Image (cartoon, grey):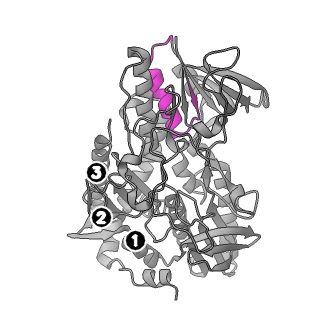
Amino acid sequence: MARVVILGAGISGHTAALHLRRQLKGEHQVTVVSPNANWNWIPSNIWVGIGKMTTKQVTFPLAPIYKRKGIDHIQAKAVAIRPEGDANSSKGLVDIVYTDPSCAGTTAQVDYDFLIVATGPKLNFAATPGLGPDGNSLSVCTPGHAEQASAAFDAVVYALREGRRQTLVIGVGHGTCTCEGAAFEYTFNVDHELRERGVRDLADVIYLSNEYDLGDFGVGGMTFAQNGFETSSKLWTESLFRERGVRAVLRAHVERVDDGVLHYELLDGTKDSLAFDFAMLLPPFRGADILAFDRGGTEITAELFAPSGFLKVDADYEQKPFEEWTAEDWPKTYQCPRFSNVFGVGIAFAPPHAISQPRKSPNGTVISPAPPRTGMPSGVMGRVVARSIADRINKGASAPLGTASMAAMGAACIASAGMGMRKGTAAAMTMYPIVPDLKRFPRSGRDVYETSGEIGLGAHWTKLMLHYLFLYKAKARLGWQLIPE
Amino acid sequence: MDEVTQSIAQAPLPTPKTLRSRTSVPHQLMRFVAFNFKMLKMVRKGNH
């Protein structure tokens, strides 16, 4: 009998758990350790943040699903891993602290034969003083945060109806943030909702980001083939900003958020402040801060995890200049090089480097996006790693590992820009591959025919369809495995 | 006017025809099908 332990029940962890259970015989154990009781379809938090959906519509309890599927669910937080075991056990161990209200704070150890680290990000609001719901800005990273943002948005609309001009700043709260796409999406949902409520004229909507150009989205921008021309995501995105009357502050690192004023540094080294009535600023991410120990109890965290807290996998982590980065640097199997039974998927794996060109201000401040690795690629990594582990359990230790390099897979990103079956709209983008490969596509690193961008009602329908489809899949209902990641 | 604002100000605006096509239900139904087909193709390409 083998036991696979999965840390995290987000998109990649939950996908891995469901596929493992399907591929392993009942004698083997699949255990999910997750601090949260609910599963959350995070892309729809954007709609909670403008009051168009409720928390209940974007979440569901994990326990009944896991009970039905025969997956063990431990509601706890992993704090340390011991890949070599300890004095009493030669099996790998995970130290956990229960978050389950019935035994919150109790510590325990869980042993494993295979471990998948799928802990997602730690929302690092502490990186910027005053950032976050406990400080002076809002977030849509969790349903709870999004509900707070929705209430604050209602207050802004109330003020606008009273004829008071309001400034809404939406973007990222640090120079090293990722997920610019989510900030972009929230910006245009806010813009759309202000128009729907008839108060857009007195509102200044400002997008504040660490991107060098609009349309970078942390993937270095895109080049599309459109109407017989190659056009850039920069031009395409700028067109939307002009059409909707949204201002942009780019190449910015937020240094501090005070009550109603944020302070930022630009890439040219200059500093400025911006007064706001509403600020939704996403935090930078870091790994879940899990420690690692060898059999003797000596800390080996630095061997397993990058300084950012993300798990090192089969990537090329050698520090080299931007010009020498290649698609080959990116991991394929997500296997930890030191321990072959440990894997890292989704946001939890350490990327070898950014995708967008790294930049620093004259003051030495890093102002460039970290690479996104959410959604579609996270689900694919979860499925591929689940198959690799199932093969090793079913066929033996020499079974080959599956691959899912971000330099060989595409992604679709649908950024909602307003809700409604007739009035809704979205910006739909596809890119192939996610990580540019200049050997295969020398002109822009990507296939310009598979990389595209379009805006319209149809894209909104797709976004809505994916909301219901992925909730259905995550609930492991009939035929869930037929829905691709 | 800063560089970013200037660049946005010079970006092309969609024509009235483009704006109509973005909300036209028959046209968008076709785009919906086309985009989903493209996504499925993408999924197949990344399927390992």
Q: Which mark is residue A234?
A: 1
Amino acid type for the residue under numbered disc 3: Lys
- Tell me whether marks 1 and 3 sit on the same chain: no
Q: Secondary structure at mark 1?
A: helix
A340 displayed left or right of A290? left
Decide whether residue A288 is among the magenta residues.
no
| Distance from the alpha carbon under mark 2 to that under mark 3 | 14 Å
Image location (x, y in percent) of residue A204: 59, 78
Which quarter of the image is occupied by the C terminus of chain A?
Answer: top left
Q: Is residue A198 above or below residue A128?
A: below
Q: State the residue at coordinates (52%, 33%).
A: A14
In depth, the one of A476 and B21 nearer the eye is: A476
Question: According to the image, label 3 marks what residue?
Answer: B38
Query: Would residue A87 appear left or right of A25 to someone viewing this image?
Result: right
Farthest residue to the left: give it: A228
Q: Is residue A51 above or below residue A55?
A: below
Q: Which residue is located at x 71 percent, y 26 percent?
A: A297
Q: Which residue is mark 2?
A: A224
Q: Which residues are magenta?
A: A5-27
For the question of whether residue A15 can be seen, the reply is yes
Using the numbered discs, state the Cα–Cα distance from disc 2 to disc 1 in whole angstroms: 11 Å
Q: Quadrant of residue A234?
A: bottom left
Nearer mark to the viewer, of 1 and 3:
1
Whole-number angstrom distance, CA of label 1 to CA of label 3: 22 Å
Q: Position of residue A265 (x, y in %)?
A: 63, 74
Q: Chain of mark 3?
A: B
SS at mark 3 in the image: helix
* SS type, badge 2: strand
> Is residue A23 shown in magenta?
yes
Q: Residues within 10 Å of mark 3 (few under 14, many from 20)?
A: some
User: Tag 1, which chain?
Assistant: A
Task: Kindly tell me whether residue A141 is visible in this rendering.
Answer: no
